Amino acid sequence: MKRIYVNEKWCLGCHLCEYECAFANSGMTDMAKALKGKEIHPKIRVEDGADGIHFAVNCRHCSDPICVRSCIAGALSRNADGMVEIDKNKCVGCFTCVLVCPYGAIMPDADGHAAQKCELCTRNLCGEPNCVAHCPNRAIVYEDRG
Amino acid sequence: MDMFIYPEYEVVRNPDLCIGCRVCERQCANEVHHYDFDLKKMAADSTKCVNCHRCVCLCPTHALKIVKSQDTYRTNANWDNQTVNEVYRQANSGGVLLSSMGNPKPFPIYWDKILLNASQVTNPPIDPLREPMETTVYLGKQKCSVERDGSGKLKNTLSPQLKLNMPIMFSAMSYGSISYNAHEALARAATELGTYYNTGEGGLHKDFYQYGKNTIVQVASGRFGVFKDYLDTGAAIEIKMGQGAKPGIGGHLPGKKISADVSATRMIPQGVDAISPAPHHDIYSIEDLRQLIYSLKESTNYKKPVIVKVAAVHNVAAIASGIARSGADIIAIDGFRGGTGAAPTRIRDNVGIPIELALASVDARLREEGIRDNVSIVVGGSIRSSADVVKAIALGADACYIATAAVLAMGCHLCRTCNVGKCNWGIATQVPELVKRLNPDVATERLVNLVTAWNHEIQEIMGGMGINSVEALRGNRLMLRGVGLNETELNILGIRHAGESL
Amino acid sequence: MAKYVIIGNSTAAVNCVESIRSIDREGDILLVSDEKHFTYGRPLISYLLYGKTDPERMKYRPDDWYEVNKVQFKAGVRATKIDAKKKNIELSTGEKVPYEKLLVATGSRPFVPPMPGLEQVKEQYSFMTMDDALKIGKTFQKEDNVLIIGAGLIGLKCLEGIRGRVRKVTVVDMANRILPSILDEEGSAIVQKYLEEKQGVEFLLGDSAAEFTGKNAVTLKSGKQLTFDRLVLAVGVRPNVELVQDAGGECNRGICTDGTGKTSLPDVYAAGDCALSHDIAAGVDRVLALLPNAALQGRTAGINMAGGTAVFDKAVPMNAMGLFDLHMITAGVYEGECYEEKADGKYKKLFYQDDRLKGFILIGDVARAGIYTSLLRNATPLSSVDFEMLEKAPALAAFSADYRKEKLTQRV
């Protein structure tokens, strides 16, 4: 299955991926209209570490996802391809998934009532992950590495 | 008192489009942009802007543009704004003005005054998609004598040659003036394309020895990084006598660009300015040059062609004639629009001659003297497109060197401030956070794309002329016509005016 | 004869079935539950009352789950006895069902300590099951005064569920603070203050019911007298160990299992709130009545029952808890040195000892808490990470480049 991988060697910490993610999931076609004046809640987050280290983190789509095991509502599941999905309709926002995800890759959504996570842009109109498409330095790639 | 100089360019932000993502702020090494937390919006300080367009390119909503400032002194055709500002700048600083990249002044561009021919009716054009179209070029001495060994078999007397899949190479840019990643991209692209890149005078980083078969190693007046392994690794050796951007001038890489890696590669102390002398201190005549050529040949077992690179200056034809007799295999001529990582502005903008005229006169002179086959001719100094390449070949070149076009392919926006060392595109810098902005995977791909595209176009243009190989195009000035050129220019170029038939 | 028999229909049972099916696609599975409902997320019952979900959405798995996993589901039937020698169980219907492998995932039940006069109280409720919640939802009225006995997780989640449905809620607990099992004193005070000020809840702590003096009146130990319309008993729970205990299986508050989920009875496994786990934070075996724990135990038992190999011996007490808009995430034990941060609406404590994170409490800002949890679960030496950076916020940047390479550049 293709997953998103990051290469911190090339990540510039520009944080564009965060905005592209927020835009991709806004359901709008105009980025300025979608994001202007709003606090964004992207599903990918860039970490800015010491010594100029930057890298983006989003859901790893683990083979044995502990978030899925831990979800009290059965809202998280792993689909046939291996992608970890969230059924927002079932999620009650207990954030047990936030408690267990070792990557910090699942988080409260904009209104804080449910969890959100990267679903590889399969639930929006992008087709392929928008963060990957817009990374200016190919620091985020979408590849099948087993 | 420092005279305030109004910035030449202004950052214009469309407030309706700006989403305050701060990408521009994070990506500007000149600290032009900042987020004002009180006003909750982005602001810009245009005085710091070098107009490199990094922010413009990365702004996700295209909210930014950089425009030429409208601020102006009283209009004066003689004392224009820039001329006045340069006086102020020097009065402020007391220093030599420094610039980068090529001569930006409005001198005539002869490529744009030369038009190409095409076949009609009496000689058919060739469709390169259906018929073979040869772009392979060999560089080196083409002359060889017929000699036989004791048993009467023919001896191979051919001098070492460079084989190029297309008549385009990446010209010299040193590691130091450009970044590690830029160097890696050039090396990998040359390898993938089946052509060559050139180390410049900065030595060869040990990581890039693996690309040696596609590397031209340069020996310049500073002799930086020159040692046996370096010479052995390259496919050819280039002696740099001069550079189009700054003929008669040496090089000066500031100490702050001499990182640990650059210092190891150049074999000079870290943090100390690297000065390349204006002359080679052992070369004062063609005979001296010959000595260096043969010492380099001797030390590499006569296996590698030696290139001598000179700037296009007034007596270039006579100089080339000397070089062609000195034992060199290839002459590289660099026109006055050639780029550089740093040059005194006055030199860059006022010294040297256009490559088109230099090439035409060199080719003609060597033919006249019957020594054209002694050497191949490579020209550089602002080859901007495949059309320029085709015209250069028709004027007599064997191949072209490109560098400005190559750095453009990697992202350069010709802001001409390489000398500052804060290249936002990760090309002309040694600052690690900036260097990492150039992912060599991406840059390699873009370089390969560019040259591949040009090569397609070259085939297309040659096909149109009914010519099916670069060999057959070389020196074929009948394929060229001038427009808007005077008699002298046409004479030097050796071409007729448009409208003149055979 | 069913190859696998599973007693229980909740988290441990479901995860056990899925794990069996990951190895054995065909072996018959019989699932027995005294609850009639389609498997549902038990902790959701408070959200049901709170209005964040409904019985349909509470389904823990898709509608075709039993079919797809080829599970024969006996609903509303109670297992009454295990005969470990004959390898069968007896059902409340009188039927005997043989098994090859048995999972006991019987959960727990509310524990009600003896309280004089309690029998007079007609309107008393517990809060453990979907039926409890549905009953509360049907009967509680807008004008009701509700008394909850117990200020632990169950009592307070019940409080959250019913607060908007009734006039007033009073919470009594013998302990002098709320949520003592997951918070430290300061944390308890913060949450208590929030509930008092923002939700108008009255707490009577360090007090308990001395005697119920009528069908809706109680006298507390302190002498204080209260009246109420409804009483919710949320004092505590007891693991349902009797089936195993009576069959001769080793129990110690919970059912004893080894790391593979096996009890001391042959071919009998136990998982979930009825079973013990090895708590690596406290270094003892105890019941960790937490959904993720039940899932991991169920998974482990399932794999082993189907002939695979899995061990789960590294349980960590941990909790994600929301009360209205206040979220808290806690884990481990609160011992050793402490890093703390207190700001408006945020409370953070990290406890560490012997180069290891021992526990943490986050109230308000819970972002990326799982990174802290992973430090606990993996017993990561703090000297191998940039703990100063981690103190400020959970970040993978604080880990070594090699760790990040392993986790972010290949499949995990």
Image (cartoon, rainbow, N blue to C red):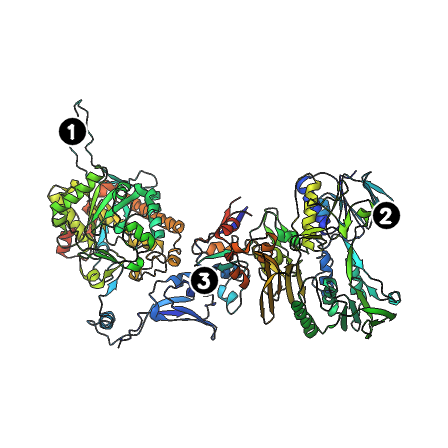
Image location of residue A114, percent across then percent down: 63, 61
Residue at the location (27% across, 50% down)?
A: B267
Q: Which residue is mark 2?
A: C92
Name the element at disc 2: loop
Q: Nearer the viewer, mark 2 or mark 3?
A: 2
Q: Chain of mark 1?
A: B
Residue C164, image x, y percentages = 73, 70
Regarding mark 3 in the picture, which secondary structure is present there? Answer: loop
Q: Secondary structure at mark 1?
A: loop
Measured as percent of width and height from the top left, residue B363 is found at 16, 46
Q: What numbered label is drawn on residue B60?
A: 3
Q: CA distance from mark 1 to mark 3?
A: 67 Å
Estimate the x, y position of residue B210 in percent, counting from the top left.
34, 42
The quarter of the picture where the N terminus of chain B appears is: bottom left
Does residue C165 lie above or below C379 as drawn? below
Residue assigned mark 1: B147
Q: CA distance from mark 2 to mark 3?
A: 66 Å
Residue A106 in view = yes
| Residue B340: quadrant of the picture | bottom left
In-image side of C124 versus A8 (left or right): right
Q: Residue flagged by tag 3: what amino acid is it? A: Pro
From what the image shows, is residue A104 above or below residue C117? above
- Does residue B467 appear anywhere in the picture? no
**In the figure, C361 relative to C291: above or below?**
below
- Rendered image: mark on residue B354: none
Residue under the image location 33 percent in, 54 percent down: B260
Amino acid under disc 2 = Ser
